[in-house]
């Protein structure tokens, strides 16, 4: 595989709904990048205004954007009622075909904020690997291995950040194999493309440090490590990660210097209900790009009405307040410390 290049290639697969989050993520990447960045954006419904909005950036000398429209059979990719993903999540399967002259690409979901330079990621040697990924917080969940029928020792990885060896994928027809797997096993792919990638590539994935895809449950790693001591009162209220104890120390180390924060829950930083650590950092980049912070709700339809009623009853003391999640206090201290460092530099 080629040595580290002067530029880095990063890919997103989005629809019109995620133009603004994508722009915020791009802004955070460029803020720290020491290399020129080529962004590859796959979509089917972006108009000229959407593309123009994504091209506008404060550091354009480090920015190049290419847009692609994949051709695909919609019936191949099942999206169930109530799923939080759209068909665009499968578009990463088309990266080897569309990015013909690219050897290595970093695929990212757009519900992420970047806190450091991504150039070192491209130093990893993928010669023998189809991709490099970060453990999912369900990495050791036996239910997943029972469903996907592969050995638990191979682990389960989060597909929100993938460093992809496109040459390997082309040579070994990985995209075609993934598409075929989804068609033949829709009942197994509860997590859609992520399940297919893990099932097809299990045992072949290079594991990256969790700092490159730091997921929300990882912020509770100190609580999880000390759950049965007196150090953390009310520890039973914290969400556990389904991840084996041998991973805990590495996660704790990564928490000291995370590079990519992944908001992989139904609450996103653009939702007013979001209480995840580093939400304020994401919103600061939003403010930088759009001049103001505009938030929506993660609830809609009948659920939104029920939540509104619940809040009124809680205000009147009839019901308890809605709890949006518990996270280790040190995560919020890290967030505030980082915010105090970066904010003065964002508006120069």
Image (cartoon, rainbow, N blue to C red):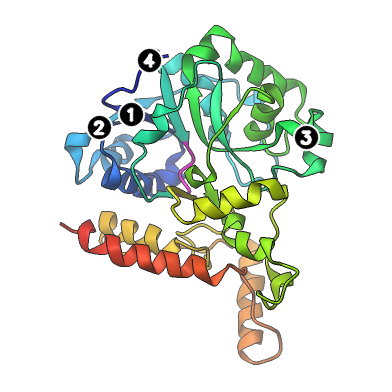
Mark-to-mark CA distance, 1 and 2: 6 Å
Check contact, mark 1 vs mark 2: CB within 8 A.
yes
What's the distance in space between the residues labelled 2 and 3, CA to CA? 39 Å
Q: Which residue is mark 1?
A: 8
Return the disc, 2 or 4, that comes first in the chain's sequence. 4
Q: Residue at x 36, y 13 (%)?
A: 101
User: Is 346 placed left or right of 22 in the picture?
Assistant: left
Locate the C terminus by quadrant. bottom left
Front in this rendered view, residue 191 or 229:
229
Quadrant showing the N terminus: top left
Which residue bears the numbered disc 4? 2
Give the label, 2 or 4, closer to the camera.
Answer: 4
Of callouts 4 and 3, which one flags the residue occurring earlier in the amino acid sequence? 4
Please tell me whether mark 4 sits on a helix, a strand or a loop: loop
- Horizontally, residue 268 falls left or right of residue 323, namely left
Q: Which residues are magenta?
A: 108-112
Residue under the point 61% across and 84% down:
312
Pinpoint residue 238: horizontal percent, then vertical percent: 68, 67
Q: Quadrant of residue 118?
A: top left
């Amino acid at each position: 595989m080629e040595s580290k290049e002067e530029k880095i290639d990063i890919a997103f697969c989005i629809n019109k709904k995620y133009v603004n989050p994508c722009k915020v993520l791009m802004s955070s990447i460029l803020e720290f990048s020491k290399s020129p960045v080529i962004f590859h954006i796959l979509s089917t419904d972006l108009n000229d205004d959407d593309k123009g909005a994504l091209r506008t950036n404060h550091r354009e000398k480090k920015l190049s954007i290419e847009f692609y429209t994949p051709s695909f059979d919609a019936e191949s990719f099942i999206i169930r009622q109530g799923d939080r993903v759209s068909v665009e999540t499968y578009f990463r399967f088309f990266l080897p075909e569309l990015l013909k002259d690219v050897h290595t690409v970093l695929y990212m979901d757009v519900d992420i904020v970047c806190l450091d330079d991504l150039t070192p990621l491209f130093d990893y040697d993928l010669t023998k690997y189809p991709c490099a990924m970060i453990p999912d917080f369900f990495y050791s969940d036996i239910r997943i291995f029972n469903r996907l029928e592969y050995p638990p020792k191979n682990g389960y990885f989060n597909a929100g950040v993938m460093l992809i060896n496109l040459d390997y994928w082309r040579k070994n027809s990985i995209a075609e194999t993934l598409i075929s797997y989804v068609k033949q096993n829709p009942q197994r792919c509860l997590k859609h493309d992520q399940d297919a990638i893990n099932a097809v590539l299990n045992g072949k994935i290079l594991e990256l440090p969790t700092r490159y895809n730091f997921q929300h449950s990882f912020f509770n790693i100190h609580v999880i490590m000390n759950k049965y001591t007196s150090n953390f009162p009310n520890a039973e209220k914290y969400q556990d990660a389904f991840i084996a104890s041998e991973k805990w120390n590495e996660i704790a180390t990564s928490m000291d210097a995370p590079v990519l924060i992944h908001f992989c829950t139904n609450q996103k930083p653009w939702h007013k209900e979001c209480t995840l650590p580093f939400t304020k950092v994401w919103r600061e980049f939003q403010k930088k790009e759009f001049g103001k912070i505009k938030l929506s709700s993660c609830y809609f339809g009948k659920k939104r009405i029920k939540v509104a009623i619940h809040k009124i009853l809680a205000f009147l003391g009839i019901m308890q307040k809605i709890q949006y999640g518990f996270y280790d206090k040190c995560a919020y201290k890290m967030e505030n410390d980082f915010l105090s460092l970066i904010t003065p530099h964002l508006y120069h």
